[in-house]
Amino acid sequence: MLFNSLAFAIFLPLTLGIYWVLRKRSWQNFFLLVVSYIFYGWWDWRYLFLIAGCSLVNYLAGIIIGGSQNIWLRRVMLTLSCLVCLGALCLFKYFNFFLESFASLFALVGIYWSPIVLNIMLPVGISFFTFQALSYTIDVMLGKLKPTRNIVDFFVFISFFPQLVAGPIERATNLLPQFQKKRYFKPDDVMHGLALMVYGLFKKMVVADTLSSYVDQVFENYALYNSTTCLIATFFFAIQIYCDFSGYSDAARGIAKLFGFELMVNFNRPYLSRSFTEFWRRWHISLSTWFKDYLYIPLGGNKVSTLKWLRNLWIVFLVSGLWHGANWTYLFWGALHASYQTIAFIKNRFWHFKPSNSWYVIIWQILFVNVGVCFALIFFRSISISHAFDFIQTIFKFELIGSLGSYAAGTGVLALAFRFLVVGLLFITYAAPNDCKFKTYYGYILFILFNVFCIVFLGQVAGGEFIYFQF
């Protein structure tokens, strides 16, 4: 069930009405569990067994780990949790990819074989709920969290529908305690939640979905277009993916707030970053901090020798790339960002200069980061490495004349003009705040009405799924 669908427009108010009629916290949690499973089962009910099984294993593992002083038993249960979560992820998401990659590798040395691939559909949001479940068990193992014995509270923590399929990846230390205390209906939270929700849908339906038709057409038929068109498509994809993903995160935060929950901020104007390190502190914050806490720091972080630190850095970015999808393009995207960090480290080690806060230096730094991010996104968007390099080659032909003519002929002048309202897009992408807070109800009402107006009259009602659903 999509946030930008008629089914959800009916589902949400009905769910809210029943939820707030239920006074007891335990009833509310059980109701949220039921509706969350309905929400997830809307795509394919068979995968409810997957999320239920993942939840049950980590629930039992947490209880055993938290109640035992036997370090061997604790490690066995943590290993079991990792095997179930990561095993399910590898089976559904990476099994075919690894088999086909090994077959291609053997073919290079003259050994040919046809691997038996699995004809299965990737469960929506599997990378999100498996990581959320796994972080709970690890936190219990590290003593950061006491295990919960209330099975309903734990199951709804894993399956909470606003952030179930595309994050943010919540930590049990933040979200689980919210299920364990009573929630109260607060008009201020409702107004703030509605503002966040419609703003997120505006980003998705008005900006991201509008740009997607241009981006899809150019990336899929890049040989028909010149350098300028491909360059614009690259820049537009950076806007599209940000508005699509941050739009989902904003909508998820808003919907959760309607039910009395506070989710973490997942984006903080990342395209205003002055370095690639800062970019990853602002982009997909829940995933970045997950890898930092559960992979980077356990490997030693930056408290090790330079070579080991670079090793840790590359491992994190390559795994992050692989997390996004079973394709070499995602690994290459991760490798590019690891390269950016490595180059920055070498520059800082051997080229010392006093930081400047002059406006032109700040603009240059932001521009430099954006160029690097957009270049890496070409690989993220392409279907193969060769496709990405061919696309880049087209950009570097420097053909500047007639860049929009053929596209305008296929889309219409008005549609094309809307796609080039660059000032508005830049404001939303680079400068718009994430909190959508106002001092008065009038401010909320005007903001909500404006976004609803834009969605109704400018939005793509038939827009597709959110980009990160595939991850």
Image (cartoon, grey):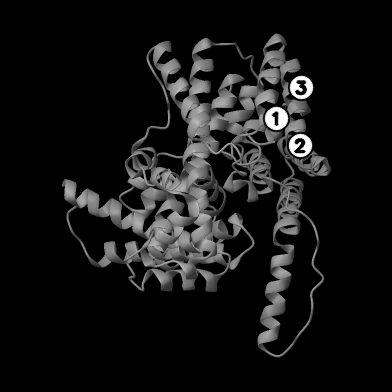
Which of pointers 3 and 1 indicates the residue nearer the eye? 1
Whether residue 334 is visible, yes or no, is no
Say if 244 sits above or below 95 in the image.
Answer: above
Mark 1, residue position: 7
Mark 2 falls on what kind of element? loop
Task: Locate residue 408: give its quadrant.
Answer: bottom left
Question: Which residue type does callout 3 highlight?
Answer: Phe
Q: Position of residue 414 (x, y in %)?
A: 42, 44
Q: Secondary structure at mark 3?
A: helix
Report which quarter residue 3 is drawn in.
top right
Q: CA distance from mark 3 to mark 1?
A: 22 Å
Q: Residues within 10 Å of mark 3 (few under 14, many from 20)?
A: some
The residue positioned farthest toward the bottom in the image shown: 110
Could you classify mark 1 by the number of other residues whose Cα lies within 10 Å: few (under 14), some (14-19), or many (20 or more)? few
- Amino acid type of disc 1? Ala
Residue beneath label 2, please?
42
- Vertical relation: 235 (above or below) 436: below
